[in-house]
Amino acid sequence: MFIRRIAVVGTGYVGLTTGACLASLGHRVVCADVDPDKIARLSRGEVDILEPRLAELVAEGLAAGRLSFVLGAKAAVVPADADSAAEIVFLCVPTPMGVGGVADLGSVEAVLAEITDVLAPDTVVVNKSTVPVGTADRTLELLGREDVAVVSNPEFLREGSAVEDFLKPDRIVVGSRSQDAAERVAALYSRLGAPTVLTDAASAELVKYSANCFLAMKLSYVNAMAELCERLGADIGDVTEGMGYDRRIGQSYLKPGPGWGGSCLPKDTRAMLQIADSADFEFRLLRAAIDTNERQRQRIVDKVRQAVTGRRSGTLSHARLGLLGLTFKAHTDDLRDSPALAVAAMLRQDGAELVAYDPALSADTAHPGLESISVVEDPELAAKDVDALVVLTEWPQFRSLDWPRLAELTRQPVVVDTRNLIDPDVLARAGFRWDGLGRG
Ligand code: UGA
């Protein structure tokens, strides 16, 4: 295997995982960021992202001299202490949702402007961020260099298992108009032994959106089926298990919940609608998945209202609710576009007083939407004098809470489990009334 000199621009989830994992595969990696404090912390091996094994890989890379952190993209492309410039430059900067759902490429453009003059001939610039179809061509244009190639190599990392997903990928997707550049990028991953799709840049860019949108549709389908199960007296757990043994469907990504969220699925589904719109294609299937997801949040609020007041409509004023989990999924401290927070905001709007416990958050965690929630660091405090406990994130440790003790602390022993996480028998034995999703 060739050892490559690699620059990674951006040290968020994707960039830091990419940098640390490529270094662990033996490559020499310099990671850049615009935040000097972050660079100083990372250079000392301090990782502030909650991600299994990431800190360990960063420490190993630093100790082996294969991984370093510098301020600014230019310094990563032409490191002061290296004898040659980067051969491959990964762009891992954020592409947030801009006006009308279109991905905002401001950070990508700023980096390109900074590095174009210092790229060595034959450098490959790799887009890892999720970017609209056509960005590879636009990148080439912005670089204005005939002697540099651009490759799209989307990432499929999930928060909470990013390192595992990187090192044991289901597939590697590499697209470019330059076959040679695509093969050089694919070769970086050769040790991983994953199926590799070599294609054009537009197809590679679309794979990422297409995969995330398909996952979102799968989840909206499951949430819709859960509602149907309730009406028909069927059990969604058994229905999805029965479906999932079909190898064409698979068991994963079939759990109902308060709706899908996080920093990727909502953004990418919106962006895909825009992409379709600009191609004059009305993507009704995807639109319905997004609408179903928004409706799901209201459905959860109605369930809570029903459980607390016995009615599906009306106010929740005078109700005190204990929320278990606020992050968008378990094993992360990420609150961006969290369905739990969206549900909390609606409950608050209906007049409920909210207290919440989440293993990844502390009483002084700051995030938009948290101002109106009292975050406590002990689940018992979240149960004290509440009219219902609402499970919103699937933290496995919630299963082994002392449920009989929690029941004693509540004003009314009621649980609304939006993740079907806790065994209903355990709750019944503890004295709780219970409602979940799709358990007719
Ligand atoms: C998602 C994709 O899964 C990754 O493949 C992709 O690389 C990433 O977006 C990205 O674009 O960067 P992530 O946002 O980390 O990863 O989260 P997921 O694990 O996909 O979960 C998304 C949402 O679906 C969460 O709110 C989660 O709770 C929900 N979910 C997931 C369910 O409600 N049920 C399930 O069975 C699975």
Image (cartoon, rainbow, N blue to C red):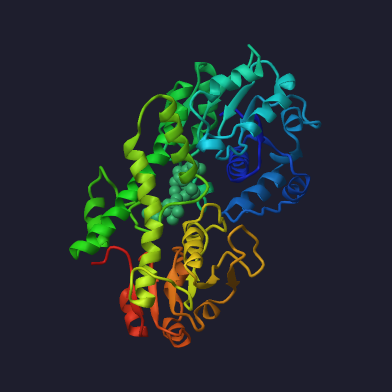
- In the image, farthest residue toward the left: 232
Quadrant position of the C terminus in the picture: bottom left
Residue at 45% x, 30% y is: 275
| Left or right: 121 as drawn, with respect to 208 | right
Residue 174 placement (x, y as % from top left): 48, 27
Relative vertical location of residue 47 with respect to residue 356 in this rendering, above or below: above
- In the image, farthest residue toward the bottom: 408
Residue toward you, 425 or 351:
351
**In which quadrant of the rendered view does residue 61 lie?**
top right
Residue at 74% x, 19% y is: 117
| Left or right: 352 as drawn, with respect to 435 | right
Residue toward you, 398 or 57:
398
Residue 390 placement (x, y as % from top left): 43, 70
| Left or right: 242 as drawn, with respect to 371 | left
Quick check: can you spot residue 422? no
Residue 78 placement (x, y as % from top left): 75, 27
Quick check: can you spot residue 131? yes
Residue toward you, 93 or 437:
437
Residue 372 placement (x, y as % from top left): 59, 67
Residue toward you, 430 or 96:
96
Q: How many marks?
A: 0
Relative vertical location of residue 2 with respect to residue 345 in this rendering, above or below: above
- In the image, farthest residue toward the right: 80
- In the image, farthest residue toward the front: 314
**In which quadrant of the rendered view does residue 309 lie?**
bottom left
Quadrant position of the N terminus in the picture: top right
